[in-house]
Amino acid sequence: MELAEKKDVVAKTMIINGKTVSFSYGETILDVARRSGIYIPTLCARADLPSTGSCRLCIVKVEGVRGYVTSCTTPATPNMIVTTNSDEIEKLRRGILELILSEHPSACLVCPIRETCEQFNAPSSKTGRVTGCNMCPNRNICELRQLVEYLGLKEIRYPFFYKDFPIERDDPFMDRDYNLCILCGRCIRICEENLGISAISFIRRGHDTKVGTSFEKLHVDGNCVFCMHCVDVCPTGALSVRGSKWYGYPDSETPTTCILCEQGCELVIDTKWNKVMGAHPVRDMSIGKREYCVKGRCCLPTLFNNPDRLKYPAIRRDDGKIIYTDWDNAIKHVSDILSNYSPTEIAVLSSRHLTDESIYALNEFARIYAESNIFYLADDEIIFPNIEKSDEIFKDIKILYVAEANSLTNDTVEKFGALENIIIQDIYPSPLSTSNKVCAVLPAMVFTEMNGTKSCADNRRKPVTKAAEPPGNAIPDWQITVKIGNALNSPDFKIKDFRSIQNHIQMHPWTITAVPMVPKDASTYRGFHIADFVPDFKVFIERRLQLKGEVHF
Amino acid sequence: MYELIEKAEIFNVHKMVIKAPEIAHSIQAGQFVIIMGNEYSERIPITVSDWNTDTGAITLYVLELGISTLELARMKVGDSLYVVTGPLGIPSEIKKYGTVALGGGCYGIGGIYPIAKACKEAGNKVISIIEARYSFMFYHEKELHAVSDQVLYATSDGSKGKKGKVEDVIREMLEKGVKIDQAFFIGCTQMLERCSEATRPYAIPTKVALNSIMLDGTGMCGACRVSVGGETKFACVDGPEFDGHKVDWKELNRRRSAYTEQESVIYQSYSHECMAEKKLRGEL
């Protein structure tokens, strides 16, 4: 492709199915056909992977060449005449598919009552060992099924050989059933060629051939990073993410940005029942070639659907009891308390994990009502974006507005000599929320539940898009701050809604760039350890620490 | 307390032999037990396939279909179940019918065995028909042969017996004029429905063992209610066997899928005792 961009290469042409098409140097017949809108069935080839020609379904007839060639590995040459489709080719492809299916549980594929059965079993039954489509988690996106439809395969002439491998469920996050594997090698290629990890390879020989790690160790004991790209490219149900495999068709797929760290990877969120059910890269990974980390790929559903999430605003009554209330009451309660203090007595603890809008709102709140007393906590370090401030200010602070309660350790709290009240705005309960200084706990949204933007490490502001509903009455952080700010009634507090915040960010971008970023290896979200909420992540981290003494994502 | 004394997997069907002498002594053909793997498990109703009053063991065939059955599937010989309640439900009506046809699929292959045995002992001609996707997925065959005059097979890929399902075998038999006086079916709801439809034109008395969602199994909660002939019945105390020609299948299927959301979401937070965890603790 790079060579094609050189000026001295003149556009060349070839003929596919009687249609004259131009091609560039280095393209294969499959590349040219795909670009020209001509479909050639493939199982092992993918646009984002190097081709090996192992499944042989992409065979085509090239005039003057004996037999049939695999289009994924044959380079296009000038004046080549190619036929991608004929009765003979279809027959050969059906034969090849039959042979592939003789080692893949395929009775359901050609079963006469398949349709009614799948309606009955929708979504698939949640079995351990998959012996048919009606129990397969990959049913909706299975490429074998698509090919059976395309080639009109009605019968498999060969007896079925079940490999009878044990089901591999002993790794965190990942289930593997190599009885479904067709040995296309996509997982191996993506791991080796695209990511350079090579955690897996073909092991054993003959009928026993399977994909596995060296010495058949657990993945967590090897060098697998659990990016799950192998799952993403698998054409069958052999590989799956245990937590997000049984929901069938998602109601919607929403592209958004993962803001767990400064990388800001593009993620697609699968939503069903208004909940985050899965997160995966865009299907064609050649667009964003990047290794995803285990946090964004595997932890989000568990982290965000946790039943412990804060759901309703709560305030402390005069008698000391904490009660649930509605937003109007809660905001009135909070603003009444805040109005008792002068700006030098108020401080704001913001969070690096908030969207730009929420960060800006907190910033603006601090500027108007708290003498710009705003700080961040990063790995026990106190960071003041306003360089004129230091922890000297803490001795005068009487009320703290906290957006990341769990990172506020006792040591930090002790620096506040005169602290009387704490307002918490968070996603989970934390040890701090039981403190008798807490006057209100306000439930906020996580990033999959709201719209906004996030500034990332590559100096780009990336879109954050709502994919799921929040639990209970939780609202976005910026909205909470705007509500409190407006209730305090200063004419200088000018932000009223989402649009006005975005306009302000355009005008004052430095307010965002001054915020410290979350490093890639961070294992917290808003001060909470992801491992405390995602059991498999805990296993992953602890096992890696035990084996290698360090853990990277 | 309820010790697991034998465990084997037959392609997602898990054979569990459990020590439960009280149940083994009092159970009759067609009855079921409710089991829990641990104190947080769902309560799962399971047909008892065999029992031995000498050893006090009962044999269950459990299909893995969710988190609670996954936990059961991962149990090992020597482990104990938290709860085994039973026998529950009304026993099958066993008398001299003449010719009895029994159809079983999935866990039903084991499920029809005690009924076949009792029918045989009552002097009936017993025809057992079992289905599976592939020939290698059959189990409990030897025992079934011992209590049946005839065992017929149906496989989806045609690798053993007729290519098709139990319903196809039944239909073929009836078309050939084989006289059947009573039919029993145990298996998934879809199989029960289709088999009942096969016997309906010939007005063959058909009993199906329903598998609705169940909690206490003693008629208190009403979770297992089904409509049979326009009447609301409890599968646990009025069943599990009902007239297959009168069951409201649509309603049953809807009720069975009532918790699809919760059943899927729970996989997000489920962490089983995996090998990695055991290695972590130095147990492996």
Image (cartoon, helix red, strand yellow):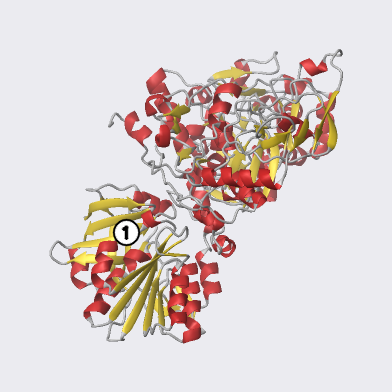
Q: Amino acid at mark 1?
A: Tyr
Residue A11 location (% of width, % of height): 86, 22
Quarter the N terminus of chain B occupies:
bottom left
B110 in relation to A354, above or below: below
| Residue A241 against residue B62 in the figure, above or below | above
Residue count near mark 1 (Cα–Cα under 10 Å), binned few <14, some 14–19, many ≥20: many
Q: Percent x, y for residue A255?
A: 70, 38
Residue B2 can be seen in this image = yes
Instruction: State whether residue B91 appears in this view.
Output: no
Q: Which residue is mark 1?
A: B139
Where does the image place residue B211, in percent across and percent down from the top left? 42, 68
Q: Find the residue positioned furthest to the left.
A: B54
Residue drawn at (66%, 38%), measured in percent from left and top? A268
Q: Is residue A29 left or right of residue B220?
A: right
Q: Which of the 4 image quadrants contains residue A114?
A: bottom right
Is B41 rendered above or below residue A186? below
User: Is A426 in front, or is B111?
Assistant: B111
SS label for mark 1: loop
Q: Which chain's residue wears label 1?
A: B
The structure residue drawn at horizontal position 68% and vertical position 27%, both measured from the top left corner, is A74
B169 sits left or right of A20 in the view:
left
Q: Which quadrant, please, contains the C terminus of chain B?
A: top left
Q: Nearer the viewer, residue B263 or B154?
A: B154
Q: Residue at coordinates 46% horizontally, 28% vertically from top-left?
A: A202
> Is residue A423 shown above or below B210?
above
Q: Position of residue A326 (x, y in %)?
A: 65, 52
Query: Tag count in the figure?
Result: 1
